[in-house]
Image (cartoon, grey):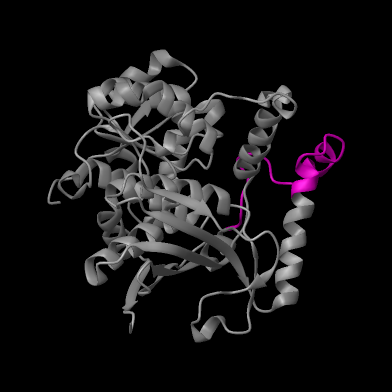
Amino acid sequence: SSTTLKWAIAGRSESKIKATLSTIAQELGNTDIVNNIDIIIADTSDQSTLQGLVENTRSIATTVGPFQKYGSNLVKFCALYGTHYADITGEVPWNKEMMRLYEHTAQQSGAKIVSFCGHDSIPWDITVTYLSNKLKEECNDQLGQVECLNELVGGVSGGTLATVFESIDRTVKDFQWESLWKKDDTTTLDAYQRLPCGSESENKIVSDLPSTISSCRNPSQRFIGKGSSPFFMAAINMEVAGRSVALSNGTKQVVQYREALVAENMMDAFVAWWGTILFGTVAVNPVLLPIIKKFLPSPGEGPTESVLNDGFLCVTGYGKGVKGNGVESVFYFPHDGGYKSTARMLVESGICLALDDERHEHTAGGFYSPASLMCDALIDRLVSTGSSFACSVSTSKK
């Protein structure tokens, strides 16, 4: 879009915002940033500050998490005032609750609410949607199964860990223990299967997630001999990609979804798998967790600059159509996927919401996954700012 972008930075502390702007100005060698960027003082826990934030704003990109603790009020006000919204949450239950509370409001106001606009879960959501679209366009085929293989190097921050621990704590507190012995005869439509009109989508994603180590299914030469292990975020990515599948134009499409972390060999895959199991065990142990937390990063602490710069994320998607056609894609992010690349994903999502209306897949307000609303436009923006994306199709010889 040729529209000029005017942006502001918002937060609770003016002094901390100015300090952040000064740091950015020094890194870019542009001292004018400090004086030319508007500052808005707002606190998501204080609803009285949010109207001024959203009412004259076209799009908001927010990192205020854990979102189930700090994010709900901002979603509410964006839905009320017709302000487009993007965040980096990985909290699926919270997002579904926001849909239950504010989807009708967003549809009325025209606000497009898009969560999961970072490492959770843009690379995988876009991969599945793009492969599906490519098969339809070039082979008149419908995606039936997909495998996403993840190669990555990066760090972890205190904010991410706080979200993980908050989600576990909330899950335990909210769990309906009587469901273990009482049969529930009621059936409630999953929010991600609900179409904007309120009916149930005929398209869905089903799990083919691995529960242990295995070899890679992708037949490409570079995966031969390599092992894979379950990826701790795969269930979240599958849910988000499933939302895009549900909102797609398929006809009773059922996509089997598999996702795994690639290792150089089966031994490395085994080590990664057991590391995930051990962390999960500690995270739900009320005795061990307080002890371990003392040695983990606190909120506000994160990977070093060198870790952010030297990290990377590469997601290779391999899909097969119901007619036997194949399609493969590679989505590469040259810096740490969870933080430096996530920041870029979020910013480009916010800009895409603000400026690229003509390329959105849906014109009406409501709750969308990233790929269901702006797949192609977002790929273009990410590629133009440092990512690489490639796709190829192999037609069936039947």
Q: Tell me if residue 355 comes above or below residue 304 in the rendering.
A: above
Which residue, as the protein is rendered here, is positioned at the far top?
48
Residue in the image at 76% along x and 59% along y? 275
Q: Left or right: 255 with respect to 232?
A: left
Who is closer to the viewer here, 20 or 175? 175
Q: What residue appears at the point 41 percent right and 70 percent down from the top-left corner?
A: 320
258 to 3, vertically: above or below: below
Q: How many numbered marks does the figure carry? A: 0
* Residue 96 visible in the shown view: yes
Task: Name the main secondary structure of what is drawn in magenta.
Answer: loop
Query: Which contiguous range is marked in magenta?
Result: 280-304
Expressed as whole percent of the image width and height from the top left, the position of residue 226 reads 63, 79
| Residue sitting at the far left | 2
Is residue 295 visible in the rendered structure shown here?
no
Q: Residue at x 75, y 75 (%)?
A: 267
Residue 200 image point, x, y percent:
36, 36
Pinpoint residue 338: horizontal percent, then vertical percent: 53, 54
Is residue 287 inside the magenta stretch? yes
* Quadrant containing the C terminus in the rendered view: bottom left
Q: Is residue 263 above or below residue 94?
A: below
Q: Nearer the viewer, residue 352 or 368?
A: 368
Residue located 29% across and 61% down the image: 133
Q: Is residue 146 above or below residue 254?
A: below
190 vs 104, left or right, is right
Q: Is residue 268 magenta?
A: no
Quarter location, residue 59: top left
Q: Position of residue 20 (x, y in %)?
A: 45, 42
